[in-house]
Amino acid sequence: MTEENRVAMVTGASRGLGEVIARVLAERGHDLVIGARDETTLNRVRDEISERGRRVVAIAGDVTDASVRRRWVDAARELGGLDVLVNNASELGSLGPLMTFDVQRFGRVFPVNAGAPIALIQLAVPLLAARRGLIVNITSDAAHEAYAGWGPYGASKAALELLTRTLAVELLTHGVSAVLVDPGDMRTRMHQEAFPGEDISDRPLPDVTAPFWRWLFDQDREAIRAQRFVAQRQDAPWHQPA
Ligand SMILES: NC(=O)c1ccc[n+]([C@@H]2O[C@H](COP(=O)([O-])OP(=O)(O)OC[C@H]3O[C@@H](n4cnc5c(N)ncnc54)[C@H](OP(=O)(O)O)[C@@H]3O)[C@@H](O)[C@H]2O)c1
């Protein structure tokens, strides 16, 4: 493997945290496959990153769509393989107290936040195994803290955390590492949707996590396997015991 042919895939890379992660990966020599539903914003990110000399394939689509996931993995294969997969795309779903929550409305939160990352990993593992690759699943403090009104979203991230730790064990024999990253509160569209009408200007932009990503992608993958990181902790190491 040479520096020139490293390849990464980032879901939800059209804005917010995913865009920052994609930029850091490109800066560190990765060609990219990026995904999100809105084609226009996704192509803007593709064009800006590829102007700096990296190959970027943008494929618009929903993470819950099996044919889209297949196209993302095929694109990585065509770029030469896959070193890093970042499952970042996520939905907040409906917020509100569980006592009055219509459970039919759990809706897409579990399939998007927990199901799709696993389905994408299933497809990507043969490529990742060939390069002793790294899976990064984006979680939230809502996976651990009982925030009133946030039950379904928090539960979907808690599910993703246990699935990721289970995968980290199961993928040992494939030589693939899996980690969790809690990025902390950031001023993004999802965060504004979580606090409608509130001034969220005191939250940092997702660029605040860039130093963490630069550190993470330089780590020995086997050494960080199964760890959970908090990206906004300013005093490295960022590892948070489970
Ligand atoms: N912001 C925070 O304070 C915060 C805190 C803790 C954890 N997080 C986590 O950080 C990650 C990024 O969130 P963010 O704040 O950067 O959100 P964001 O700005 O809303 O970005 C979400 C990205 O995911 C894409 N996306 C959403 N649903 C998708 C779907 N079904 N299929 C494909 N792409 C989809 C969006 O593009 P399209 O809408 O065009 O598809 C967009 O590119 C998420 O996993 C989130 O749970 C965020």
Image (tube, rainbow, N blue to C red):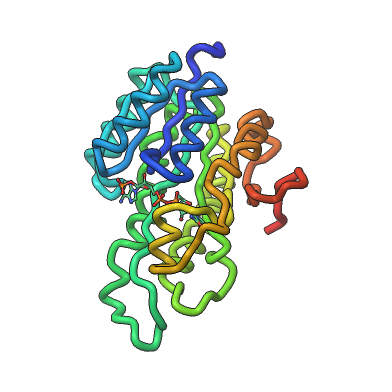
Query: Is residue 200 or residue 26 the one in the foreground?
Result: 200
How many callouts does the rendering have? 0
**Going 48% across and 57% down the picture, which residue do you hit?**
160
Does 5 appear above or below 164? above
Horizontal side of residue 82 vs 120, given as left or right: right
Does 125 appear above or below 168? above
In what quadrant of the picture does the C terminus appear? bottom right
Q: Position of residue 234 (x, y in %)?
A: 73, 47
Horizontal side of residue 211 vs 114, given as left or right: right
Does 77 appear above or below 67? above
Q: Position of residue 206 (x, y in %)?
A: 53, 46
Q: Quadrant of residue 110?
A: bottom left
Query: Is residue 56 or residue 196 the one in the foreground?
Result: 196
**Going 43% across and 30% down the picture, which residue do you hit?**
126
Query: Can the viewer see residue 122?
Result: no
**Going 39% across and 68% down the picture, which residue do you hit?**
196
**Going 34% across and 55% down the picture, which residue do you hit?**
112
In what quadrant of the picture does the N terminus appear? top right
Horizontal side of residue 153 vs 221, given as left or right: left
Q: Position of residue 238 (x, y in %)?
A: 71, 47
> Given the current orientation, which residue lies at the most extreme bottom position?
99
Query: Can the viewer see residue 241?
Result: yes
Q: Position of residue 123 (x, y in %)?
A: 36, 37
